[in-house]
Image (spheres, helix red, strand yellow):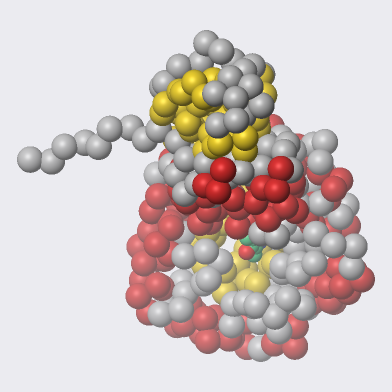
Amino acid sequence: MSVEPPPASLRLRIDHAALAHNWQSLDRLSGAARTGAAVKADCYGLGVDECLPTLRDAGPSSFFVAHWSEVEAVARYVPAGDIAVLHGPMTAQDVAYAKAIGAVPVINSIQQARRWTEARGGRCHLMVDTGINRLGISPTQISDDAIKALDIDVLMSHLACADEDSQRNARQLATFREVIGQIECKSLSLANSAGIALGENYAFELTRPGLSLYGGIARSELKDVIRQVAYPEAAIIQTRDIKADDKVGYNGEFTAYADMRVGVVSLGYADGFLRSWGNVDGRSGSHLLHDDRHLTLLGKVSMDMMVVDLTNAPEVREGDWLSVPYSLPDAAQQSALSQYELLTVLGQRLR
Ligand SMILES: *Cc1c(COP(=O)(O)O)cnc(C)c1O
């Protein structure tokens, strides 16, 4: 007999209105270009089933995944023909799958182009590498017969440094411009989230935001435009009354200044709440929220627990939920992790 495990004492709340708002904001910033959505890595960790219905209703024209194995989950919500697979057809099996399910490959090399054409694959996208040196044909290969034989819908390239003020952005743009005159295609695409913030020169006819859909601030220009989407929440699993001079947590880092009520929260560094956000060395500032009241973190963050001061919320009981303020840019700065890593790790742990 199999028994359903009880619900976890931590969870991730998705603000669907914010997700839709972020797509609409990026769509507005994309000007006349259509706006797609990168939904790879299970919607950056937040969950295809959770995010796709909201995104679909907002209205992207194309959805981007990395792997063929990601297509099926996304195709439950949108037509397979609107799904582009960034890694392209690497094997005959990939080609057969693409044709059977109807998702569109992004062709990244001469070999992939041949593989696709020989199988009479039909419509595809083409990635040209303009300087990131990741996937894509090189600009000099654009006139290769294998490329000319393709039925190209979107001709795309990908920016390496769009989140910085780098001259390489303009250089990649110029290289892309040189390439696009040399091949037939239906539309052009260059910008990811950060690229959209670089302005309309970068938007072409289709943009491909990912990170900023889910609340990441890819560039400072997006700070007031993009809203937080992922809200970690954790339950109080015990409350305790402690006496003045009692110490809390590993190494007794916090000493009670008076008799006080504290709550043990089911959230720790194993869940992506980094130890460095605790009150290490007496540096305070981290807090959780109950309604809008700040509950200060006391002592060190443990693997699966942390302790908060309940002075501001005396009525809070075991089983009550607290929300975790989680600014991706601040967290990235404090942890030396990227917003991409924080989002994907956080989502996987908490869901
Ligand atoms: C991941 C990815 C995107 C989305 O990038 P963000 O920086 O998350 O907006 C767009 N295009 C390609 C080719 C990608 O791999």
Residue 44 screen position, x and y as percent:
55, 51
The residue drawn where x is 38% and y is 58% is: 101
Q: Residue furthest top?
A: 315
Residue extending furthest toward the front: 245
Ligand 1 rendered quadrant: bottom right
Q: Is residue 20 visible?
A: no
Nearest the eye: 219 or 273:
273
Q: Position of residue 309 (x, y in %)?
A: 60, 26
Q: Which percent across, then down, holds residue 306?
A: 52, 38
Whether residue 233 is visible here, answered yes or no, is yes
Name which residue lies at 53% across and 86% down: 111
Residue at the left extreme, as displayed: 1
Say which of 129 and 186 sits in front.
Answer: 129
Q: Which of these two is toward me, 126 or 259?
A: 259
Please tell me which residue is depicted at 13% across the width and 41% down the height of the picture.
Answer: 2
Residue 314 horizontal side relative to residue 155, left or right:
left
Q: Picture coordinates of residue 243 (x, y %)?
A: 54, 23
Compared across the picture, whether 39 is left or right of 10 comes to right
Taking the image as shown, residue 130 lies to the left or right of residue 61, namely right
Q: In what quadrant of the picture does the N terminus appear?
A: top left
How many marks the image carries: the answer is 0
Q: In front: 167, or 196? A: 167
Which residue is located at x 52 percent, y 47 percent? 250
Q: Classify 195 as above or below 88.
A: above
Q: Is residue 43 above or below residue 114?
A: above
Q: Assign the C terminus to one quadrant of the image.
A: top left
